[in-house]
Amino acid sequence: MATATFRIWRGEKGQGKFQDYTTEVSTGMVVLDAVHQIQAEHAGDLAVRWNCKAGKCGSCSAEINGMPKLMCMTRLNSLPLDQPVTVEPMKAFPHMRDLVTDVSWNYKVKQRIPKFQPRKPDAEDGTWRIAPEDVERVQEFRKCIECYLCQDVCHVLRDHQMHEQFIGPRFLVFAAALEMHPLDVGDRVEELRKQFGIGLCNITKCCTKVCPEGITITDNAIIPLKELVVDRYFDPLSKLFRVFSHTKA
Amino acid sequence: MAEYITHEHDVVIIGAGGAGLRAAVEASAAGARVAVITKSLLGKAHTVMAEGGVAAAMGNVDDRDSWRVHFADTMRGGQYLNNWRMAELHAKEAPDRVRELEAWGALFDRTSDGRILQRNFGGHRYPRLAHVGDRTGLEMIRTLQDHGIHLGLDVFMEYTIVKLLTHGDRIAGAFGYDRERGRFHLFRGKAVVLATGGIGRAYKITSNSWEYSGDGHALAYHAGASLVDMEFVQFHPTGMIWPPSVRGILVTEGVRGEGGVLRNRNNERFMFKDIPPLYVNQTADSEEEGWRYTQGDKNARRPPELLTRDHVARCIRTEVREGRGSPHGGVFLDIAWTKEKLPNAAEHIKKKLPSMYHQFKQLADIDITQEPMEVGPTTHYMMGGVRVNADSQMSEVPGLFAAGECAAGLHGANRLGGNSLSDLLVFGQRAGEYAAGFAKENSLGAIDTQELASAEKWALRAFEHNGSENPYGVQHKLQDTMQDLVGIVRQEQEMQQALERIRELRTASDAVGVDGNREYNSGWHTALDLYNLLTVSEIVTRAALERKESRGAHFRDDFPAKDDQAGKFNIVARKGPNGEVQLTREPIPPMREDLQRTIEEMK
């Protein structure tokens, strides 16, 4: 049986070091399988967060050979096994232990985004009619499994640590899903500009590249939101209109 | 004296999948202060894995559908062991529960006239499953989560409950630990709702995640509640089988609903060979009629691939056993063949089954629009669970409620696909409503601090053993035992052997040792989960020994026929005075006459 070496980050609260573990590998294995094997054979207390092992829950996010990925969807045959495979926790969030980070900030951010507000039901039976083509655009955003890999790779969060000023790509996608929802009548444009920091995104598209669900985060969600903000706040015609109609900016 | 942090709420909900969140929303709306305790992060529970859809007789695609048809389908699927009152409530209330999700932001696939689209599924007479491609569960949990976070729920993420606390005969709270720091917590609650899901982790090949260790089943049982129908474990016919590391991952029934067919190595549609008498009138005579059914022809009957899961799983097993299986010990599931019928089949498949396309492409290097998949049965769902009052979802322990997979009754001997997501909604809502009502009428129960001290000592004992038994090793042995000896086809001798092994593993589990400290220590958590896994494994095995017939998901090689007498009782398990499992056969109450008539009319 072939073996491979995994260089896994061990430690607590940001302190720690890489440790090498060698384990058997077989056809079709993913990184999470190797981590589980190492847990069972060598390191019973190795901390790792996981759930579905099918790319649907977004729990097992990590950095594999430096790339933000889901451990359960990263096949070993996609990695060079003649050298150690490094497995590290995500960097944009506080470290807890081994491969586990504290992602609770994301949950707090979501709570700050004004919730879904449907328009009044318009069908006789007290529900709504929505054309098939009107759900598709938002369904793309609703595929999100909240793995937070997009947050992890976003330099505004990762390098500049601007967690107070910027909600990150995940929640811009979330806001876009609400803003473009065929039933929603809420308005989040002012928050997007002022509290959610949409202007801080300079569309390098790193988030789009790492999304395991293939959501076109930058082009389909962030840029249209930026356009909403620009239309409202920076379009000279509507500015003029607001002056005369005394509406608030 | 135990060291712990105390929390006080009106309603304590254990589990944050569909049932737990729906209960939380309801209890909170009724004015209760609600705690939601979840083993994982919020929004990661097993509900995200549900693919095909939520069954509700809205009649959007076929207006012949009604709650009566749905009721009759559910009872037939459950081989009439179901709690008929639950089946009635479920069929009547599911449409409102689905529409309510839409009002909270869920975006289902649509019909051409803009209503919620419904798809065909096994055992459902008409297209009935509201869905979002093949990620319906994700849509549901996200909708409930995003709605719930604005209701002032106290959510405790990555907390595990190890013991329920009672005062006299009623519930008083729950005791557990947090993963991050390993500290203990006392949750005092006037009412407690169990919504912990299933027991799939007791088996080696399963579609379930690590969380599904039968916590709610075992917690309720040890607290004095009864469990019912525990012999009925559903093996989903189509799990992935190759490569080995993905074995067990679910392949949605939606593949068959969209026209996918099962073939053996001889290219034969073997499902046509064996059609159970209960379904002869509803099943297509020819491949051509089956295809028309999947394409919405109202005059066609469904193809045999859409028979109930118990039957399809056994047929697949027979093909494999008799040497007609696929190279890796399964059969072929083919949706690519639809290109013979549809001009844009590949695009259509990707649109209707995006995550299946993705899953096979990424994990197995298979393009399902071009070639068949290899599939085989995987442990999927627990029909058995906490015995509850149909209307209120309260167990026999006052103040202790259960909803969703960890409760029993709705599905009888076999669950229909799509009836799980609707179960979560209908009975999650009811559990939340009645738990909040119970909390209004009762005060907090007293806590016995001695009990907490001994629970803490028990929970920490693995740190005192010096690595004599490895918790992962014990778990793997249990999974092998249940898989090999109490699986899809059962017999007396093998199950007796399983009981023997479970006894040995219980001794081994008392001696497991773990390294490291209490902070996010997976080994420790695995050691603690063993207790529940062993409890439910023993009960499943004993109940399966007690039912000496074959019915629904329970198939006995030594009693291959259905026995009419055995169709008149449920098997109920309670903890005896000396800690032993006590089983009783309890007669099914006679069905209300109007419901009986409904069943007759739908035959």
Image (tube, helix red, strand yellow):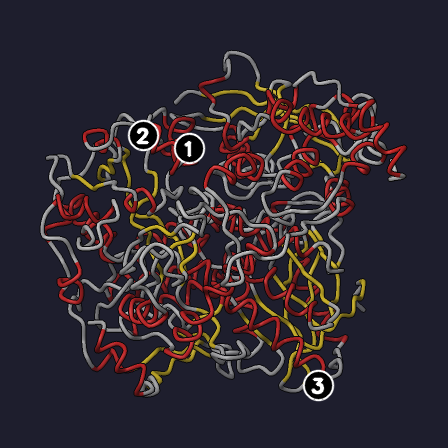
Tag 3 residue: B441
Answer with the quarter of the image where residue A223 lies. Answer: top right
Give the alpha-carbon distance from disc 1 to disc 2, as whole Å. Answer: 10 Å
Spot occupied by residue B561 in the image (x, y as percentages of width and height)? 15, 69
Task: Tell me what residue is drawn at x 58 percent, y 47 percent.
Answer: B44
Give the alpha-carbon distance from disc 2 to disc 3, as whole Å. Answer: 56 Å
Spot occupied by residue B2 in the image (x, y as percentages of width and height)? 78, 66
Task: Tell me what residue is drawn at x 43 percent, y 72 percent.
Answer: B92
Dot 1 falls on a residue whose secondary structure is: helix
Q: Is the same chain shared between marks 3 and 1?
A: yes
B385 sits left or right of B564 in the view = right
Tag 2 residue: B368
Which label number is shown at residue A75? none
Tag 1 residue: B359
**Camera-side residue: A228 or B589?**
A228
The nearer-to-camera label among 1 and 2 is: 2
Mark earlier in primary sequence (3, 1):
1
- Pointer 2 indicates a residue of which chain? B
Q: Residue furthest front?
A: A244
Spot occupied by residue A89 in the image (x, y as percentages of width and height)? 68, 29
**Camera-side residue: B269 or B320?**
B269
Spot occupied by residue B13 in the image (x, y as percentages of width and height)? 64, 65
Image quadrant holding the C terminus of chain A, namely top right
Dot 2 falls on a residue whose secondary structure is: loop
Mark earlier in primary sequence (1, 2):
1
Residue flagged by tag 2: what amino acid is it?
A: Ile
Do tag 1 and tag 2 residues touch (Cβ < 8 Å)? no
